[in-house]
Image (cartoon, coloured by chain):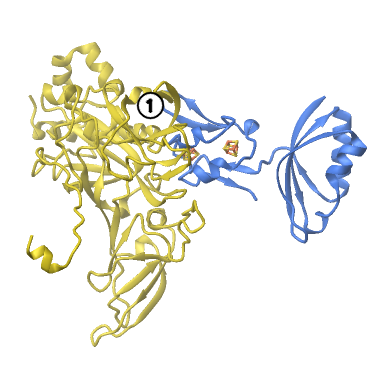
Amino acid sequence: MITKKYFLYFPRSETEKPLVYHLVKDYDLVINIFRAKVTPDEEGYLILDITGTEENIAQGIAYIKTLNVTVNETVRGLRWDEDKCVSCTNCIVHCPTKALYIADQKTKRIAFDEEKCIECLSCVKNCPFNACTSVF
Amino acid sequence: MKTYDEINKKIESKKAVVLNAEEIIDYVEKKGIETAAKEVDVVTTATFGPMCSSGCFLNFGHSKPKIRITEAWLDDVPVYSGVAAVDVFLGATQLRYNDPANMYYPGDFKFGGGHVIEKLVAGESVQLFGLSYGTDDYPRKEVRTWFTINDLNQAIMVNPRNCYQNYNVAINCSDKPVYSYLGKLKPNMTNATFCSAGQLSPLLNDPLYKTIGIGTRVWLAGAHGHVYAEGTQHSPVCERGENNVPTEGAGTLALTGDMKRMKKEFVRGVSFIGYGVSVALGIGIPIPVLNKDILRHTLIKDRDIFAPVVDYSSDYPNATGNIITKVSYEELRRGTITIEGKEVEVGSLSSYNKALKISEILKDEIKRGDFLISQPIQSLQLDKQMTSLKIINGTKQDINNL
Ligand code: SF4
Ligand code: SF4
């Protein structure tokens, strides 16, 4: 069993398919949704972890792609802009998973480990310098 | 013993020995204070953080026909126009017109004066909307146009209070979140926030204002500005610890500089959830090593600088003056402090990373002969304390009878 994180983008017309239902029922996958914005008649976004056998995940993803949904393994819903970040460290206490962390103790430089980010958006609210933004 | 002139001659001939306030600590440990005082010419100090009492005067030049602006907005942020016809003052904490503020608590405060200042320094276009009642000599009643900083005759930053010598550490002892200018404070003393460059900070390295005074040339976000007055709330009479370093707010500086020469990296609009907007600035101040005494003061370490921990849920808003305890910057920078037996996570609003960078930039400028030091034309007062506002109820008659 492996777990993979995906960023799904739905064009306007594809938001009404019961996609998660099919992933669970037809492909025996465990779904953990981090964040979703799916509104009828609008484009939508879904960020989720999919757990299952490599083969089942591949088949599930292939199924999603037939629905015209854009599947991305590298894009994240949270953007940290290195140029805007001043390394103040205010976000450190608000990030529950330490995805934002002090990369260098001597110079107090901040870095972002996107693998650890659970898209809680706490940093978006708490970064005074607008370095953390949400894609949707 | 050295004089300002001697040091400047060395700077001009590119021979000055310059270290930042962090490096000087090890240097003196190795060489001893006597030798170091002879060898080192300048110690650079720096800070980067939100500084609310900041703003700028802008002059637009005259339109045809002329207008004497009586009300104006820059990117919808109101500016003060109670000065000459096309001069305005833009303040860092001014909210954009129509911002819902804390109506939907806690508000986001996405845009305000600090952000307009950031845009100007970055060279971006800003919209001016101005109104007037019209006069014989200034007949125009309305102006709406776009401009960049290059179109302005002057853009002069004038900051009544920067570089607080030391500062509070904010904590929240209540059971509800507190939204403050030191960020979001979670309930029940879960996190604490500080805002100082500690051992790099200008006035902590010159605690008795021996070299930093009115007229001192400073590095203000890349421009070469100067101290034009003591800062508002300058309050040097306070508790002082090791090396005369204050353990509370204490001294402040009023700074000015040409915004056209500033770098965008060091002028940043900031938004505090539930509180408001402001601007963060990067400032560097050189300390000339005139003698051993001045050098000794620059050796202060984070572990010897203490800041008061204050409850922002009740003691701060009610101005009780109570503090919970004092903690050192060494502990703060480590990321946790222990308060009443509880481990508390620490974040900061100032950036040590940027302060370090500024101390290096200033060091390079001095070494290259591009930044000369200046002797203050007047020292900062040492015998002053902050007064509070008295609230007087009653009529004018009652006051006259007091
Ligand atoms: S709060 Fe924002 S600017 Fe400060 S360290 Fe975190 S991401 Fe960077
Ligand atoms: S979204 Fe949440 S988990 Fe991700 S970096 Fe921001 S605070 Fe951390």
Residue type for callout 1:
Leu
Can the viewer see residue A125? yes
| Residue toward you, B390 or B22 | B390
How far from the left and from the top, in percent, is residue A136? 65, 50
The image quadrant of residue A35 is top right
| In the image, residue A74 above or below residue B156 | above
**Chain under label 1?**
B
**Residue B41 horizontal side relative to residue A22, left or right:** left
Can the viewer see residue B15? no
State yes or no: Cβ of the residue under disc 1 lies below 8 Å from any atom of ligand 1.
Answer: no
Chain colored yellow: B
**Residue B393 horizontal side relative to residue B118, left or right:** left
- Rendered residue at 43%/36% (across/down): A88
Q: Where does label 1 land, which residue? A: B332
Task: Please identify which colour was used for chain A in the image.
Answer: blue
| In the image, residue B109 above or below residue B64 | above
